[in-house]
Image (spheres, grey):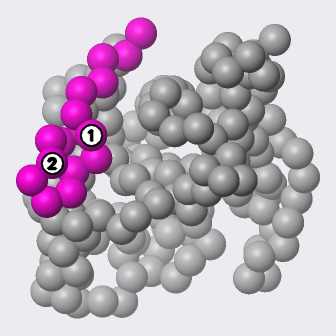
Amino acid sequence: MSNATGRPSSGNATAMRIEHGRLTLRSKRPEDARDDYAWRSDPELVKFDAVPPLRMSWEDYQRVYAGEVRNPPGRQLSLGIEDEAGLHIGNVMYYNLDEFAGQVELGIMIGNSDYWSRGYGAEAVRLMVEHIFESTSVHRVFLHTLTWNVRAQKSFGKAGFVPVGEVLRNGYNFVIMELWRAMDGSRPASGSPTGA
């Protein structure tokens, strides 16, 4: 059972914090900018998102980042991931929230490679999905992962996502994976796309 407090930070709103086991998901902070800039500028990391490395200067990035932390864009939520010692190891987010269509897209980056293949990603995804189903009316969470990124697909599978097809975007092949809220309105059971 997770312990969630607060709401997404916006202006003077209460900061969000979701704790469970060895992980904490929490609102983004200005001091996260240094990690996020390094991760988004790293050619090895950004290849997992099929995007080029960030070319913006640190000064420009810091200015844009501070504005986004103060006033997060609507229809999305980005949270920092901390380990048990409070170290910022990555981010998990949802975006393109469409409550009318009942769906939202999810993304994650474990930027600190010391934490790869240790279950932190799957745990963070499970916590974020639980938060989505508890705080919105969406019934479908989906994501795209590159077809060659088998490690990510296994991690998402541990969090209950199932592959449902492939799509070509910007010259890259992605696997589409999804997780549905149970038909009775409850959260799906871990590892089951339907809660059955």
Magenta region, residue range: 1-16
Q: In this picture, is 187 found above or below 67?
A: above
Q: CA distance from mark 1 to mark 2?
A: 7 Å
Q: Position of residue 158 (x, y in %)?
A: 66, 25
Q: Residue at x 74, y 32 (%)?
A: 180
- Which labelled disc corresponds to residue 13? 2
Near-viewer residue (22 or 179) = 179
Relative to 127, 68 lies left or right:
left
Task: Give the quadrant of the C terminus.
Answer: top right
Residue 193 in magenta stretch? no
Near-viewer residue (119 or 27) = 27
Q: Residue at x 22, y 34 (%)?
A: 6
Q: Residues within 10 Å of mark 2 (few under 14, many from 20)?
A: few
Near-viewer residue (114 or 165) = 165
Circles 1, 2 touching at the beta carbon (< 8 Å): yes
Q: Earlier in the sequence, mark 1 or mark 2?
A: 1
What residue is pinned by disc 1?
7
Residue 88 visible in the displayed image = no
Q: Quadrant of residue 11?
A: bottom left
- Which labelled disc corresponds to residue 147? none
Magenta stretch: helix, strand or loop mostly: loop
Near-viewer residue (57 or 77) = 77
Q: Secondary structure beneath disc 1? A: loop
Q: Amino acid at mark 1?
A: Arg
Q: Position of residue 143 (x, y in %)?
A: 67, 51
Q: Residue at x 16, y 65 (%)?
A: 70
